[in-house]
């Protein structure tokens, strides 16, 4: 098997450019770093286009029975890369010796059937990839049925989103849509909507979050827009700060809804 050794190799340059949002969307592809996240994408049937493995770690991955390497070998989409050249496509200081290129799936969430008592988490205009990734991670842990990115400043296939989610986003139903599209979809499915607002008079744990509910959290700096005309709930703040990180707020709402459903 040939080994790519030049950092200027066109295939490696293509992978590196996929870390840019505009190029990623133009190509319909995204990159995933690390064996854990790649394996989780594969387990959720995301289409692996090519797997790049640093050459001097290939034998170890094979000995460990790597799912990612095994799938790539079967599909003949495995490329070995010299250690120096691999730096071109590795994510910052995180060099785990494996980078996968996947096909971006079509947006199909609005065509999906929702559970009769499901939880939908709506992330409205979230800007920071790390926060969006943490929201996905919490949503997976709380058993959320779908996560919707509403006009976010970052896309869910940003490397930092994938990393912060620990690959949890691959196991969740999710999609990116406008506020109008999401609101119409939730109305059709008869979901009750609860918006997290700092100034809401009602504490979130006193609200009835059973049944089919949508939990909406807003942008880090400005909060939710006024076009979310829904029941508002707040998270009591007992210290000196007046707000929580948006991913923490999303986690609290999701877990409280799950708790109420199980009581």
Image: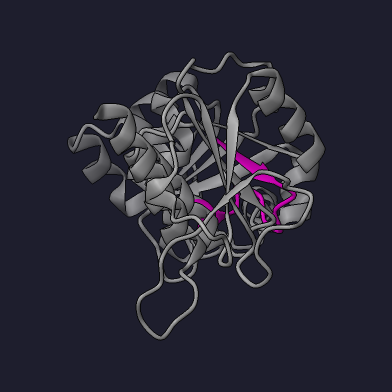
Q: Nearer the viewer, residue 197 or 20?
A: 197
For image coordinates 63% across by 21% down, the residue present is 190
- Percent across and percent down for residue 160 are 52, 59
The structure's colour scheme is one colour
- Percent across and percent down for residue 28 are 72, 37
Magenta residue check for 223: no
Is the residue 262 above or below the residue 134 in the image? above
For image coordinates 77% across by 42% down, the residue present is 179
- Percent across and percent down for residue 213 are 52, 32
Q: Residue furthest front?
A: 201
Displayed quadrant of residue 139: top left
Can residue 191 be seen?
yes
Displayed quadrant of residue 83: bottom left
Displayed quadrant of residue 211: top left
Range of the magenta residues?
147-161
Quarter of the image for the C terminus: give it: top left
């Amino acid at each position: 098997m040939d080994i790519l050794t030049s950092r200027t190799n066109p295939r490696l340059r293509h992978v590196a450019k996929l870390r840019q949002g505009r190029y990623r969307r133009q190509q319909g592809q995204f990159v995933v770093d690390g064996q854990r996240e790649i394996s989780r994408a594969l387990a959720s049937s995301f289409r692996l286009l090519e797997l790049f493995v640093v050459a001097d770690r290939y034998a170890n991955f094979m000995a460990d029975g790597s799912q990612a390497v095994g799938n790539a070998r079967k599909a003949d989409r495995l490329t070995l890369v010299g250690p120096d050249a691999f730096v071109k496509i590795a994510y910052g200081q995180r060099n785990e010796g494996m980078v996968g290129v996947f096909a971006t799936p079509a947006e199909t969430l609005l065509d999906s059937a929702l559970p009769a008592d499901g939880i939908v988490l709506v992330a409205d205009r979230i800007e920071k990839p790390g926060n969006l990734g943490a929201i996905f991670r919490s949503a997976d842990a709380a058993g959320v049925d779908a996560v919707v990115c509403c006009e976010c400043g970052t896309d869910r296939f940003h490397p930092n989103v994938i990393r912060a989610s620990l690959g949890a986003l691959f196991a969740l139903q999710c999609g990116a849509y406008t506020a109008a599209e999401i609101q119409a979809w939730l109305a059709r499915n008869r979901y009750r909507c609860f918006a997290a607002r700092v100034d809401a008079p009602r504490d979130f744990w006193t609200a009835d979050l059973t049944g089919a509910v949508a939990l909406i959290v807003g942008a880090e700096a400005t909060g939710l827009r006024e076009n979310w005309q829904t029941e508002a709930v707040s998270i009591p703040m007992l210290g000196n700060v007046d707000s929580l990180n948006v991913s923490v707020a999303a986690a609290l709402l999701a877990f409280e809804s799950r708790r109420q459903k199980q009581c």
